[in-house]
Amino acid sequence: MARIAEVALFTPDVPRLTDFYERLLGTAPRSRSESHAYFDVGDTIVFIHLVTHEDAEHDAPSGDHVAFAVPDQDGVSDELRASGHDVTGPKNYYWGRSAYVRDPDGRIIELVPEGT
């Protein structure tokens, strides 16, 4: 069974968005800088990223997305590919092993290994 591991939000103004989520969630981020912040919300991380073109160089989409932790990342990726979806990865990135796919409405979905 999959679980939501992360909600990633991209912004040109990390401090502004971080302040908003700090007020909304009622807690300080676990980590904060000019380029990122993240909050622990139960078993899910809300990760705020600075919009850059750096991720495009790594084949990772730099847009808002939901990351699902799945027990068989390779198997899920293969099943999605077999049913006609364009899947990038799984691939090792500097932040870990991820695969990316768009849902039928075009939303970015990241697949990460369970335990992430």
Image (tube, rainbow, N blue to C red):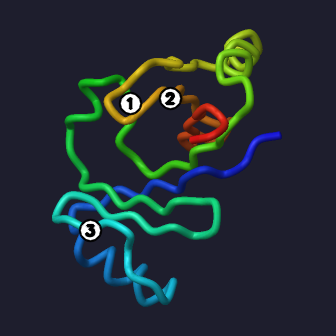
Percent across and percent down for residue 87 are: 57, 20
Percent across and percent down for residue 84 are: 70, 14
- Say left or right for 35 vs 96: left
Q: Residue at x 73, y 16 (%)?
A: 75
Q: Residue at x 66, y 16 (%)?
A: 74
- Label 1 amino acid? Ala
Q: What element carries label 2?
A: strand
Query: Split into 4 quadrants, where in the image is the C terminus?
Result: top right
Q: Which mark is residue 32?
A: 3
- Label 3 amino acid? Arg
Which sits earlier in the primary sequence, circle 1 or circle 3? 3
Is 14 located above or below residue 4 in the figure? below
Is 3 located above or below residue 89 in the figure? below
Which sits earlier in the primary sequence, circle 1 or circle 2? 1
Q: How many labels does the image show?
A: 3
Could you classify mark 1 by the number of other residues whose Cα lies within 10 Å: few (under 14), some (14-19), or many (20 or more)? some
Residue behind mark 1: 60
Q: Is mark 1 on a helix, strand or loop?
A: loop
Measure the C-alpha gap from mark 1 to mark 2.
Answer: 9 Å
Q: Nearer the viewer, residue 62 or 36?
A: 36
The residue furthest right is 1
Residue behind mark 2: 98
Query: Split into 4 quadrants, where in the image is the N terminus?
Result: top right
